[in-house]
Image: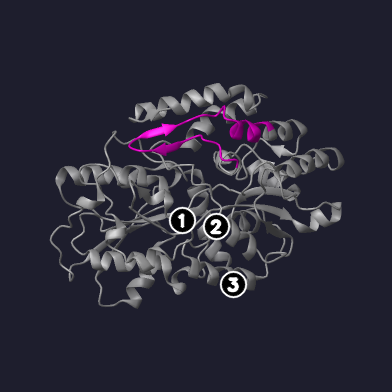
């Protein structure tokens, strides 16, 4: 398990750093899936699959289980760490009219924002390739980031739904209760700052912090509607309440301004994490493999909600996707491979991250329980949160993480509050969106 997670750490850390990152494509119009016309098919032809190093083994496992299918595997970055290799190559292949991989994996579902666009998009509408019974087996909302104009252009490999991580050993030792609302979370954070200085209930220096806090708060930071129309309003009350909470806890000292992957944080603060809202992959990737938190201490609770909200929502940090090429001459084999690597229990049960396919997720959770790492079964919290990701935070051609990292994080390090730079943050998002052809409301 340790070796497998070490590989997952590299991939998921990269995923986290580029979860919403994508290249800056030329503004284009989405193709209508109803007009999708496959190229001439040859079901005996070899298919080429591009995947990152972490996903190559599962593709090789498919080859072993399906010896009659000809599969060529190409290892590439997976568009991790902000890379734009897939899009760059696809643009080249578009010019030469050849070379497109039949199947491609990306660590970021935001790649859909370019792959589904153009007169002949790279991504085929998978709802025209895979059967409805397969697509309906994914967690509710899992395929929303893959959906453009009502058609599905990718298949989610894994989810990164937000939960509330906590150190049960420390929580019991301090005599605290797990908060169920963000108001309780803030009050506990202020109490921790006074009673146990140095202990933390979260971080705000990660590029994906907005996806943890503002997404869960239903902040309309980027809500896409219609054809390239986007609403960006960081002054909305559902944004400012999350910002105010973070600023309060940063000032108190119980929310760190560092990133969880900073060497200094890992060395000096990781052992003092009492609580931390974050994605499902934090458990094994962050607490186990990175922080080396001892076995039997870490547990996960359901995401908190704001007391005034009637429903609980959470955010999402990452989650890789598989694309099937619209240029593929063997859609049957391409679709079968994508279906197997995302839904087969033998492919997903021991993966490093939470499977997007519900049945595979059940097997995955059973495996997590069998490791004995967690203080309590994380299954209930994970399963519930997988259905609570707020659908109003859209995949876009621009990276929220890059903008937050360049606009807000430096301000935090200068001692400024998030609220004091909201106008600059808003302007930066608007400018980037406009440059890519979005109509900003």
Crowding at mark 1 (Cα within 10 Å: few <14, some 14-19, many 20+)? many
Instruction: From the viewer's perspective, tell me whether residue 270 is left or right of residue 157.
Output: right
The residue wearing badge 1 is 142
Q: Secondary structure at mark 1?
A: loop
The residue wearing badge 2 is 386
Measuring from the top left, give residue 289's x and y in whole percent. 61, 58
At 41% from the left and 38% from the top, the residue drawn is: 224
The answer to whether residue 78 is visible is: no
Measuring from the top left, give residue 192's x and y in whole percent. 81, 42
The residue wearing badge 3 is 366
Query: What is the span of residues highlighted in magenta in the rendered image?
Result: 217-244
Vertical placement of 322 versus 405: above or below? below
Q: Are marks 3 and 2 in contact (CB under 8 Å)?
A: no
- N-term-proximal mark, 3 vs 2: 3
At 50% from the left and 37% from the top, the residue drawn is: 401
Q: Are marks 2 and 1 in contact (CB under 8 Å)?
A: yes
Measuring from the top left, give residue 232's x and y in whole percent. 48, 30
Cα distance in 3D space between marks 3 and 1? 20 Å
Cα distance in 3D space between marks 2 and 1? 8 Å
Vertical placement of 34 versus 392: above or below? below
Mark toward the viewer: 3 or 2: 2
Mark toward the viewer: 3 or 1: 1
Measuring from the top left, give residue 322's x and y in whole percent. 36, 57
Q: Which quadrant is home to the N terminus?
A: bottom right
């Amino acid at each position: 398990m340790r070796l497998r997670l070490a590989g997952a750490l590299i991939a998921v850390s990269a995923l986290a750093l580029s979860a919403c990152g994508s290249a800056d494509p030329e503004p284009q119009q989405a193709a209508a899936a109803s007009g999708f016309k496959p190229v001439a098919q040859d079901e005996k032809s070899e298919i080429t699959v591009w995947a990152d190093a972490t996903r190559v083994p599962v593709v090789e496992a498919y080859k072993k289980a399906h010896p009659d299918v000809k599969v060529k595997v190409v290892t590439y970055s997976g568009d991790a760490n902000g890379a734009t290799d897939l899009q760059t190559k696809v643009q080249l292949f578009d010019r030469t009219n050849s070379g497109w991989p039949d199947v491609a994996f990306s660590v970021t579902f935001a790649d859909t924002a370019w792959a589904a666009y153009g007169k002949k998009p790279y991504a085929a509408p998978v709802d025209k390739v895979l059967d409805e019974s397969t697509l309906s087996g994914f967690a509710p909302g899992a395929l929303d980031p893959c959906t453009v104009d009502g058609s599905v252009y990718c298949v989610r490999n894994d989810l990164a739904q937000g939960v509330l991580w906590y150190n049960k050993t420390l929580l019991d030792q301090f005599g605290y209760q797990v908060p169920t609302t963000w108001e309780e979370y803030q009050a506990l954070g202020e109490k921790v700052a006074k009673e146990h200085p140095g202990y933390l209930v979260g971080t705000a220096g990660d590029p994906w912090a907005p996806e943890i806090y503002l997404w869960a708060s239903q902040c309309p930071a980027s809500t896409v509607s219609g054809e390239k129309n986007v609403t960006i309003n960081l002054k909305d009350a559902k944004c400012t309440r999350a910002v105010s909470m973070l600023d309060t806890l940063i000032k108190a000292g119980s929310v760190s301004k560092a990133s969880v992957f900073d060497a200094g944080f890992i060395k000096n603060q990781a052992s003092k994490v009492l609580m931390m809202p974050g994605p499902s992959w934090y458990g094994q990737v962050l607490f186990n493999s990175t922080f080396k938190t001892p076995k039997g201490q870490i547990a996960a609770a359901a995401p908190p909600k704001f007391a005034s909200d009637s429903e609980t929502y959470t955010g999402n940090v990452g989650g890789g996707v598989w694309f099937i090429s619209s240029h593929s001459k063997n859609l049957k084999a391409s679709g079968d491979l994508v279906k197997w690597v995302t839904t087969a229990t033998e492919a997903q049960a021991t993966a490093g991250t939470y499977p997007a396919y519900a049945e595979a997720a059940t097997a995955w959770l059973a495996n997590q329980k069998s490791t004995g790492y967690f203080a309590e079964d994380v299954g209930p919290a994970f399963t519930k949160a997988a259905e609570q990701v707020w659908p109003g935070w859209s995949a876009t051609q621009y990276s929220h993480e890059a903008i937050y990292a360049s606009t807000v994080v430096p301000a935090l390090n200068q001692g400024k509050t998030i609220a004091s730079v909201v106008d600059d943050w808003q302007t930066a998002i608007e400018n980037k969106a406009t440059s890519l052809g979005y109509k900003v409301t």
